[in-house]
Amino acid sequence: MPARFYVTTTIPYVNARPHLGFALELVQADVLARHRRQRGDQVRFLSGTDDNSLKNVLAADAEGLPTQELVDRNAAAFEALRQPLALSPDDFIRTSRDPRHRPGVERLWRACAAAGDLYRKHYQGLYCVGCEQFYNAAELRDGRCPEHGTPPQLVTEQNWFFRLSRYQGQLHDLIDGGQLRIEPAVRRNEVLSFIAAGLHDLSISRSHTRARGWGIPVPEDPDQVVYVWWDALGNYVTALDYANHGPDYQHWWVDNPSRVHLLGKGVLRFHAVYWPAMLLSAGEPLPTDIFVHDYLTVGGKKISKSAGVAIDPVELVAQFGTDPVRWWLLRDVPRVGDADFTIDRLIARTNSDLADGLGNLINRVTTMVHRYRDGKLPDCAAPPAADAHRLTTACQQAPDLIAAALDAFDFRTATAAVWAIVDEANRYVEHVRPWYLARAERDGDSRAATDLDSALDVLVRSCQTLAEQIRRFLPDTADRIAAQCTPSVGRLPTPQPLFPRIATPEPRRSPARCS
């Protein structure tokens, strides 16, 4: 039976349109999903939107719109990222609209209540609306939220609490023992340090008044609204019909050995501490893996809707194309550490890799087949020459190297394995110099004819391997490579450029100074 793989992204607030920072997470999840499908596994890839946030209410107020209208408009923009980013989700959940969600949240609440883990008490704390999170004074930076740089609100009210402290030892042991795997290791260590410092019970509801009536009412207590993070985290199982413990929940969660969450480092605590504790309380299985990416920045500032630092991925794709954007996100963003985005870096990566490296290789190979063999693939029964060893090795090793890298949540290393084929193929062309062999063949050298056939055969097969191995990263490019390297009516199609070079924008001139 094929292996199963359930992969999820976080669900973003819809107080504004999508930005490039979330596109990174979507593309990473898409690569993992495509990779596992390519291996023959059963895959379910879930994304969605977090509709029930106070941030959404405030954004609607600022635009003079009803909350549901703003939420519907912006949620549609997130769902529409499928086409420009070439995404392949199997499911998309909206927490304010999807009929699977509220009953599932209510079931989770009641399960934790039945375990004796919910209680109500008076509370006062410092609350950041941007994070939808309470902070201790020690966690603030100069009295401001460490994520948004805004002063938190002092909130005093009666709320429901979750006995998070009860699960401190269990969580530590599960993460330390690897049953709940967190990658990269620096994030795992961060979570272990947070747990070791002591877990405090968590406020999990807000007054109906402060929530402005927006959100899911607490079961049996309509004066309270379920805390948006409790509500949102539940989507990973409510989308599987957890409310009814349906067959999808059994198949993709309970009986599935690969339950993988992708998320940014800013929400690690919610996913690696609060969410597993909720599941432990409810008696349900935990995720198996948590993969954490760092931030995209612009000019050193985190890309964020709240901070007003945003790059629209749809506009970026409209200007430069889907695959250049996907490739930059996968090739340039490190496994650990923030990545600063600029248009110049996107253009440089596109030109050096996709135009000069990959595009030039495919064009050279297919053009030589047409020029020297009238577009017909050589019929080579003999093994490749010894001088093709490095290229054939790169082709043979790529699948295992890519699989190991993606299992470690390392997209740079995975794409490097693909790029080794490109580099070795271009090196092989320069080493063999098919144009010299063709000239010698015309002069009557039969050995040169055999060597030319062998060289062209090796190169075409390498390009076909490239199409297969790059598919999980750049599906459209893979299709175009495969089309150019697959005979039609006995001949390869007429060569077509894969990627034109992008002109670097003219640098802005500084205003002239007056003396």
Image (tube, grey):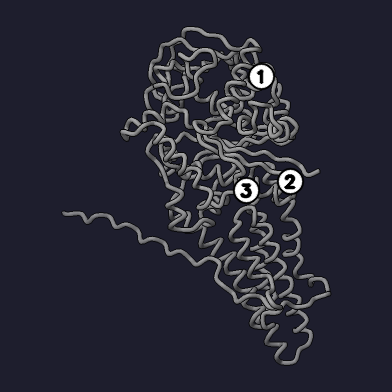
Q: Nearer the viewer, mark 2 or mark 3?
A: 2
The numbered dot on residue 41 is 2
Whole-percent x and y of residue 326? 54, 52
Q: Is residue 128 left or right of residue 399?
A: left
Q: Residues within 10 Å of mark 2 (few under 14, many from 20)?
A: some
Whole-percent x and y of residue 504? 42, 62
In terms of image quadrants, where is residue 420? Answer: bottom right
Q: Residues within 10 Å of mark 1 (few under 14, many from 20)?
A: some
Say if residue 175 shows up in the picture. Answer: yes
Whole-percent x and y of residue 195? 61, 20
| Tag 3: amino acid | Val
| Tag 1: amino acid | Ala
The image shows residue 489, relative to residue 167, as above or below, that is below
The residue under label 3 is 31
Mark 2 residue element:
loop
Q: Earlier in the sequence, mark 3 or mark 1?
A: 3
Q: Residue at x 61, y 27 (%)?
A: 272
Mark 1 residue element:
helix
The residue under label 1 is 282
